[in-house]
Image (tube, grey):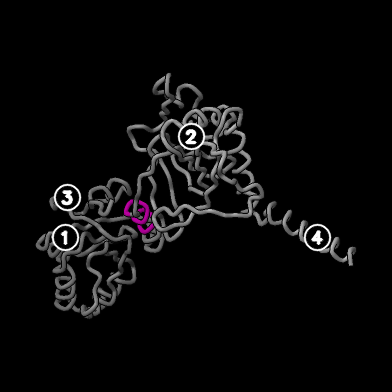
Amino acid sequence: MDHISVDQVIRDHQLVDLTPEIPGTALITTNDINRPGIQLAGFFDIFAFERIQILGKVELYYLQTLDKETCTKRFEKLLSYPIPCLIISRNLALSPEMVDVARRHQVKLLGSSMNTTKLITRLSNYLEYHLAETARVHGVLMDIYGVGVLITGKSGIGKSETAVELIKRNHLLVADDTVEIKKVGHELLLGYAPELTRHMIEVRGIGIMDVKSLFGVGAIKNRTEIDLVIHLEEWDNDKDYDRLGLDENYRTILEVKIEEVKVPVKPARNIALIIEVAARNHRQKMMGYNAAQAFNDRLIDYLDEEYRDLR
């Protein structure tokens, strides 16, 4: 989503509503947080008013150093901008005059018991997740040996059947058929199932199955980071397939490059086993060891020795 309401933030963070008569329908569109200390000092030429504003102990202490007229004037100027809400940390209190200013400008005041740093960190992470760029992909998402594996391929290729076999091997289903993907930060992709199909899987000839009921809660996972894409395709006798694993392919999702392995499908091939091995191999690469590269280096050394012997 590209926005979130103040009411939802209040519910998700158990914030104290100091002005319940003001609607919490204002929309938050950025995950950045602002502490308006410089604005309270009188500088408004640059003001990120579209962000959640947080007042902590430092800001309130500064306001107490001002005379009453200047303090009210600065606060009036601050809330004259269309800010989504103002949160006061540490259960600190505003003066009745400041609360009246908020009511007059219809800016929602909220309270939190957390210290300012912790509150900002928590809200930033929360907003980054909920306001993240999203995409929808057709496929199956599983957690295999701690590796988030997105299995893709055309309809009928056997993705769901392979997923059932992997579940029987004690791996975890995240999503079947439709995978929702969020881009968190610059390089992290999180995948999860839509609410409608969560924990469900479709197998042609059988229909819809509830994995949670059939295999237990130990067979499912609500979301996982996407580390590897396995693309299933029909075996083509005229196509040369990579036999060493030196050629690295990538799938770009939401401008993030994810390693992709293309697996040809034909009778007698154990696709679930191949995907297990691919996940193990990817994990080994992430730990710094590439078997294909090690074999290639060994082969080059062997050929060099043979060449020297011939000379």
Task: In the rendered view, tell whether residue 111 sits above or below residue 192.
Answer: below
Q: Residue at x 21, y 78 (%)?
A: 44
Tell me the number on the disc at residue 303.
4
140 and 17: which one is in front? 140
Please tell me whether the stretch drawn in magenta is mainly helix, strand or loop. Answer: helix
x%, y% of residue 229?
50, 46
Residue 179 appears in the rendering? yes
Q: Under tag 4, what secondary structure?
A: helix
Q: CA distance from mark 1 to mark 3?
A: 11 Å
For label 3, the residue is: 20
Marks 3 and 4, the one that precedes in the sequence = 3
Q: From the viewer's perspective, is the residue at label 1 or at label 3 nearer?
A: 1
Q: Tell whether 262 sits left or right of 93.
A: right
Q: Amino acid under label 1? A: Val
Label 4 with label 2: CB-CB less than 8 Å? no
- Where does the image place residue 178, in percent across and percent down from the top left? 38, 38
Residue at which label 2 appears: 173
